[in-house]
Each structure stands twice: as structure tokens, then as C-alpha cells.
Amino acid sequence: MGFPGTWMTESESVVYRVVPKCACSTIGQIMYYSDHGEFFDGDIHDATAGIHKWAIEASQPVIEANVRAHRSYAFTCVRNPYTRILSSFFDKICGIQRNGRRYRGNLVPLLIQKYGIEVEGDFDQIRSFRRFLLFARDTIRWRKPMDPDIHWSAMSGHVSTFIVNGGTYDSIFFTEKFNEGMQSVLDAIETKHPVDLAKIPRFNESEGHGPKRAHPVEDYFDDLSMHLMWEMYSRDFKLFRYDFENPANKMPVSEIDLDEVHAKLGD
């Protein structure tokens, strides 16, 4: 299986396991900048040179050799499951993608037809989101009407492939404490070009794709929605220390125990 979703600087200064909707655009650009002294011109997800990615065939043996020998500092970044799935909904379901079309072609028409979701005009965001949540649960639990998408499949699933195939994380930090976490990574590695986090723009490539969220996070989650969230993401809440009981609290409740993550996701 190898190391899907894994990126590495060309200088092999650092290895990163991408978790979708968790600051991956900004992290990728920081990695690119640390090697080249400039940002990639465009969405870093489109870069096919200047950075190693598992999706680039020529990068695979380089990444594999590095990760299996743990030659470089390896990290990933996680996010509160409540805000992550809301972001996925507004970006991927309600938004027009950078190619000018809806995400995954027939996905939105399928959701409109089968789940009664609305995405046009002044629609009821809370009602449509809760119906989307039902769809997300169906994809994760039963792989129907399709396999779960990377943007709403559990973070623990993304994080685990790296461990199961022989990788070890030196750090897992929180999107909600981005500067602090990213700085700890930069402090632990040597880069060709110095990175001043205070001057780095946020590369939120999904921003502007969809409508703005009209309500506080907690308004989207009633008792049934929270039940569905636990069904899908209980491992994420527990391992990455987020507050399941209170959707209004986006901050982690304690630090992540890396040994526990490696033990529980390495099976």
C-alpha cells in the first residue's frame, strides 16, 4: 500500500502526512517555500515538481526509503471533527470548485435527489447540512451510495496508513493552534530557506468556493447529528482530544499522546 497522502520536501528535511481539511494547503506551501524560497504559483495540490508526493510515481521510492528508515522528522495536523465536516460541506457540496464545476460531477445532483439537500440561493443551511451528515454516515458505515470521500472520512484513517505501513510520527499538532504547532516542526528541522510564520499567508484554497456559514457551529448539531458524529468520528474525538459533548468548543481539551496514537492506529 505504501504511503498514500504523504508529501516530503525535495531536500528531505521533513515528511508530512496530508489530512484533508486540516490546513494542508498552507503546510504544503510552507514546505515548498522552505526548499525554494518562494511559494508554488497556484494550488500546492496541483504541484507535480518541487516537492515529493506519493501520488507522483517517481517520488514513491524516495518517500518509502525515507519513511521506513525514519530519516526525517515526520508530522501531521488534525482539526476539530465538527468544524472539519462543516468545512467539507460548505466547500465540497455547496461550492463551485477551482475547475468551475461542482465537486465530483454527479455528487451534488445525487444528494439533491436522494437526500433532499439544497445548495442554491437562500437555502436552509442547517437542514441541508444535517441531511448531508446522514449521507456522510451512509458512505462511512455502509459505503453506500458511494465510498467515503477523503474530505469527510475519519482523520484517524488518514493518520493510520502512515503508521501501519512503517512510518512514525514525531509530531501531530492542532489546526486550532497552527502557529504553535508548525513552529515546533520548523524548530526541529533544518530548512534551506528560513520560514517566518508571522509573514506566511494562509493558503485556504477552499475559501470562497461556497456560501459563508450563517450560524455558529453548535447550531448545526442537534442530538441526532451528534449521534451521527460519534458513529463516524468517535476515534478522532478520543485520540485527538476534541470535545465531543460541546460542539461550540473547537479547541482540544488536552495534548495528544503520540504513543497512544501509534499503538491504537498501528494495528
Image (spheres, rainbow, N blue to C red):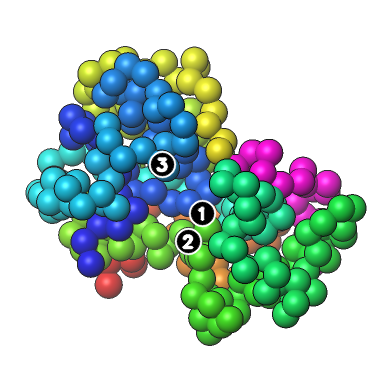
Dots 3 and 1: beta carbons under 8 Å? no
Residue depth check, mark 3 versus mark 1: number of the one nearer the observer: 3
The residue beneath circle 3 is 46
Q: Would you say residue 248 is visible in this rendering?
A: no
Q: Would you say residue 122 is visible in this rendering?
A: yes
Which contiguous range is marked in magenta? 206-222
Quadrant holding the N terminus: bottom left
Residue 134: assigned label: none
**Identity, as a three-letter code, of the amino acid under mark 1:** Arg
The residue beneath circle 2 is 150
The residue beneath circle 1 is 241
Magenta run includes residue 218: yes
Residue 67's spot in the image, x, y percent?
17, 49
**Distance from label 2 to label 1 (Cα)?**
21 Å
Q: How many marks?
A: 3
Find numbered disc 1 in the image and state the secondary structure of the residue it sits on.
loop
Residue depth check, mark 2 versus mark 3: number of the one nearer the observer: 3
Please determine whether, in this image, residue 184 is positioned above or below residue 93.
above
Magenta run includes residue 97: no
Residue 202 appears left or right of 4 = right
**Distance from label 2 to label 3 (Cα)?**
17 Å
Residue 158's spot in the image, x, y percent?
39, 60
Residue 158 appears left or right of 149 = left
User: Which of the two labelled residues, at mark 2 and mark 3, occupies the earlier sequence position?
Assistant: 3
